[in-house]
Image (cartoon, rainbow, N blue to C red):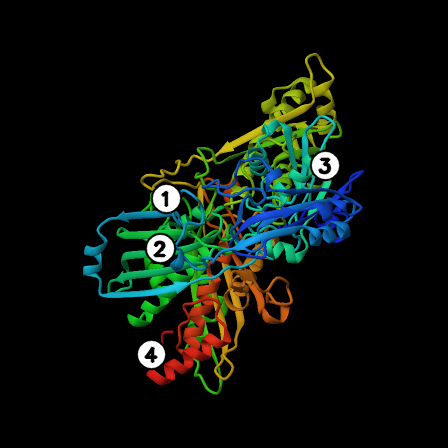
Amino acid sequence: MSESTLGRDTPQVNARAKVLGRATYTGDIKLPGMLFGKVLRSPYPSARIVSIDASQALALPGVKAVITGDDAPAARWGIAHKDRHILAKGRVRFAGEEVAAVAAVSEKIARDALDLIRVTYEEDVPILSPQEALDPEAPPLHDGADNVSHQIRFHRGNVDAAFATAHCVHEQTYTTHAQYPGYMEPMGTVAWLDADERLQVWTSTQSVFLARARLAGALEMPVSRIRVMAPAIGGGFGGKIVEDANTLVAALLALKVRAPVRLVNDRLEDFLAACSSLPERITLRLGMDREGRIVAKDVHIVADCGAYSGLCAEIMHVSAMRSDNMHRLEHVRCDAKLVYTNNPPHGAFRGFGGTQMLFAINSHIDTMAHMLCLDPVAIHRLNAIGVGETSVHGWKIGSTGLLQCLTQCTQAVGWNDSRDRPKTGSRHRGFGVATAMHVSGNRTIGNWDGSTIFLKVNEDGRVVVHFAEGDMGQGAMTMLAQIVAHELDIPLSHVHVSSPDTDISPYAIGSLASRVTIVSGNAAIVAAKAARAQLMEVAASLLGVDAQALVLAGGGVHVKDHPLQRRTLAELARQHIWRHGGEGLQVKGTWDAQTVMFDKDTLMGNIAPAYSFAAQAVEVEVDTETGQVQVLQSFVADDCGKALNPMAVHGQSNGAAAQAIGWTLYEKLHLEGGRLANTDFADYTMPTIDALPDMRSGVVESIDPNGPYGAKGASETAILPGAPAIANAVYDAVGVRIVDLPITPEKVLAALQAKAASGVSHA
């Protein structure tokens, strides 16, 4: 028998190609006659376009086309709102918006041509904050609508009456900021109109089918005239779902010049073009009884989507509601507004709105624990929702390892032994803990949250898997290969997983909402079992026995009581073809979660087949003379249901924790007058190795009843508790609470000075 890799550390199946430089990314694709695209962007956050003169650019030798908004279809694109043109028409709404694009025989010529395009602007006074945008006198950013892009309101139970019963009530406002995705591979696209007048698109996307649908809508083309392929992807973190303009501009250029066009962002362009995470201002009010039980919750959120809404409505929905489901709550109220401004657009980012609210709720729980003289861990345990329970929004919890996550992470950092150490000198140490919840799947896009896998057994007995969910580096291809190899009892090397391609792959939603393991993993099991059944049927015919008397193992099928009576998978696959009525052995497997379509009126519904949990404990050192915060220990415990590949889970969990440390202490996009000021890694301070502790993580296997072998989503949950765990540790170290991220030395020093002056410990 072949040794199964399920539950064992397994290198990614495409790791060798990547480390040897042989993996093909979008920027590596070269086609005969290929041109190079570049984009001219607005220098103003708000202005009317008076005129565009491209005559000098067109006269430059080597320039094949210059396009503007006049060359684009009238259709607008977007998610909740179709509010954006491929290239600006009539006016620009943020600094960096795409105004014109060039196709030339080299990148240098294309770049030089941009300098020759003369755009006359009539600059307006920009609206740069939600507060300005919500002013009744503020002009609307978009015609025919006010500056509120989306609003969420709900009220469960009797919140006011519940607050009246609370022993302790606390209210605080928290602010969170934008984080750049920071993927290794900037966004890129190669587009080509082929001989059959079909648009061929290679792009770095988390969802080839959502990308195809967006192209079809924006270009006013039938989807069947568009083919989207995803080569190797150098990271996504949510930023490569469906919010970039790169793919649309490249496609429009290709249609104009009727030749292949390569449009790959350099890092500066990617900073200007990529959607960063959604900034939110959260006012949270909680009521607790004497034991720390949450009896009432009231939330107000104002979020800044920037000039266009993108996925921000869905992100704010997560901020508004998801954290409610990790606690036993009855009385909850929320009012959340998403607001247009002239800032660069924000959008999807790993954690998808959970990071913002979980910073607030975990900071709040820690504050109230001190007010009640309780251990915050005890409050988390008391309020944690349990297996078999249904949350206040109708989520049914099939598995949870949250309590085990709390135990694992606090024991790892020495929570009980070290929190009371004396604080002497200028460097004080403190400990913090936080918890989190995330979905594994999400029935909110439409009434389907499934996946389909095509599986072919070739004549040599090896298997090819076609899927389209997407592998952006998280290991989806490896997971699918592991499952198919396990089910067919063949070596992992005998399974090849092909890259997503809308012409070849089955329809899929894509790599988002931590859904790939649970939905495509289950679909792979269905497909592999279907292939197994066909192999057994052929073997039964060849060996002259009933299929029930056969065993599939070790790359073949043999008679249970007579192991020497055997046929290899290669022989069976060939026999499946070479017989009357035969055909190649190819099957499909589809799995759709038995969940409930999200009700947009009641905001209720069990939207995911499983829910993931995590907890993180950290130790920090705060220098009271400089305000510098250093994370000394980090341990994140990830409830992934079942770790199909522990190596991948640990890698993703620690990567998520590192990204959270960056957001909390170092990373922030600085806007000056609506213009991005730090547009490269020299000025945008992502944490380097010397800024990170020894990253540690643990796995909790709660075995979900709906997951493949009990597995559910991993790694995205692990980004959620980092910021509040660090903020809580800072408070434990020096007695000041920072509620405005990021936690910079300047904020820590100001809070310490305010504390010394007034004795107030909150800042």
Q: Amino acid at mark 1?
A: Trp
Q: Which residue is mark 4?
A: 760
* Chain-order first, disc 4 or disc 1: 1
Kindly report which numbered mark, 1 or 3, lies closer to the viewer in this rendering.
3
Q: Which residue is mark 3?
A: 257
Q: Amino acid at mark 3?
A: Val
On the rendered image, what quadrant is the C terminus found in?
Answer: bottom left
Asked whether the viewer can see residue 21, the reply is no
Could you say whether the residue bearing mark 2 is in a helix, strand or loop? Answer: loop
| Tag 2 and tag 3, C-beta contact below 8 Å | no
Direction from residue 516 to residue 397 in the image, left or right: left
Circle 3 residues within 10 Å: few <14, some 14–19, many ≥20:
some
Q: Amino acid at mark 4?
A: Val
Direction from residue 20 to residue 446 in the image, left or right: left
Mark 4 vs mark 2, CA separation in Å: 38 Å
Could you say whether the residue bearing mark 3 is in a helix, strand or loop? Answer: helix
Q: Position of residue 292 (x, y in %)?
A: 29, 63
Circle 4 residues within 10 Å: few <14, some 14–19, many ≥20:
some
Q: Which residue: 61% across, 54% down?
A: 647
Q: Is residue 121 depicted above or below 726 in this figure?
A: above
> For residue 395, which numbered disc appears in the image?
1
| Tag 4 and tag 2, C-beta contact below 8 Å | no
Q: Quadrant of residue 535?
A: top right
* Chain-order first, disc 4 or disc 2: 2
Direction from residue 318 to residue 345 in the image, left or right: right
Mark 1 vs mark 3, CA separation in Å: 51 Å
* Chain-order first, disc 4 or disc 3: 3
Mark 4 vs mark 3, CA separation in Å: 65 Å
Q: Position of residue 625 (x, y in %)?
A: 50, 84
Q: Which residue is mark 2?
A: 137
